[in-house]
């Protein structure tokens, strides 16, 4: 069991750029993931609740990358932006154990995790693109849309 969700309505844009704003159409991926789109998210698996508030695009991209890496590797990690936590992933056969470095741990089937991570990335990109239309013109975001679509 895995639950991944966020609310675009409750996710802010950028208030941390060099002048307190960011041009979403031209911003690089670092700024988009680390400096923008903070909001509440739900991330639960069997045995652990990692839900909180943080950079939702960073979370979506980090989980998507972890899922892809676990297709080939036994272990990987994702360091959430702004010190929001270090997630450790370990795949054993068809099961993935996810642990927050100083927090809970739980398990989920690998295929369920991979599908949910890809779908969550797509949901975040769609939700943020609807709330912030200029984001849809960003080449980095267009590339991530292809990743979320499995291309």
Image (cartoon, rainbow, N blue to C red):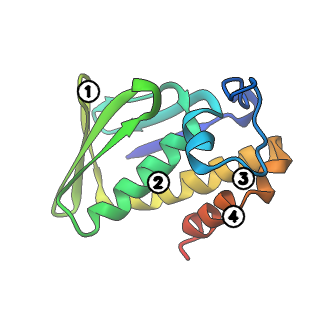
Q: Secondary structure at mark 1?
A: loop
Q: CA distance from mark 3 to mark 1?
A: 30 Å
* Badge 4 or badge 3: first in the primary sequence: 3
Q: Secondary structure at mark 2?
A: helix
Nearer to us: label 4 or label 2: 4
Residue underneath mark 2: 117
Q: Is residue 149 above or below residue 85?
A: below
Residue underneath mark 3: 126
Residue underneath mark 4: 142
Nearer to us: label 3 or label 1: 3
Q: CA distance from mark 1 to mark 2?
A: 19 Å
- Which quadrant of the figure has residue 94? bottom left
Q: CA distance from mark 4 to mark 3?
A: 11 Å
Q: Nearer the viewer, residue 118 or 25?
A: 25
* Badge 4 or badge 1: first in the primary sequence: 1
User: Residue at left 62%, top 27%?
Assistant: 39
Tally of marks: 4
């Amino acid at each position: 069991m895995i639950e991944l969700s966020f609310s675009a309505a409750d996710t802010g844009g950028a208030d941390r750029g060099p002048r307190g704003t960011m041009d979403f159409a031209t911003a690089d991926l670092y700024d988009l993931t680390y400096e923008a789109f903070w909001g509440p998210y739900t991330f639960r698996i069997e045995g652990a609740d990692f839900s909180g508030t943080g950079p939702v695009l960073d979370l979506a991209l980090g989980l998507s990358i972890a899922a892809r890496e676990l297709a080939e590797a036994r272990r990987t990690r994702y360091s959430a932006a702004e010190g929001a936590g270090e997630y450790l992933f370990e795949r054993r056969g068809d099961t993935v154990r996810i642990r927050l470095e100083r927090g809970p741990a739980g398990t989920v089937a690998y295929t369920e995790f991979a599908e949910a991570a890809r779908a969550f990335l797509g949901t975040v990109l769609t939700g943020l693109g609807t709330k912030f239309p200029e984001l849809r013109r960003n080449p980095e975001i267009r590339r991530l849309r292809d990743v979320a679509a499995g291309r």
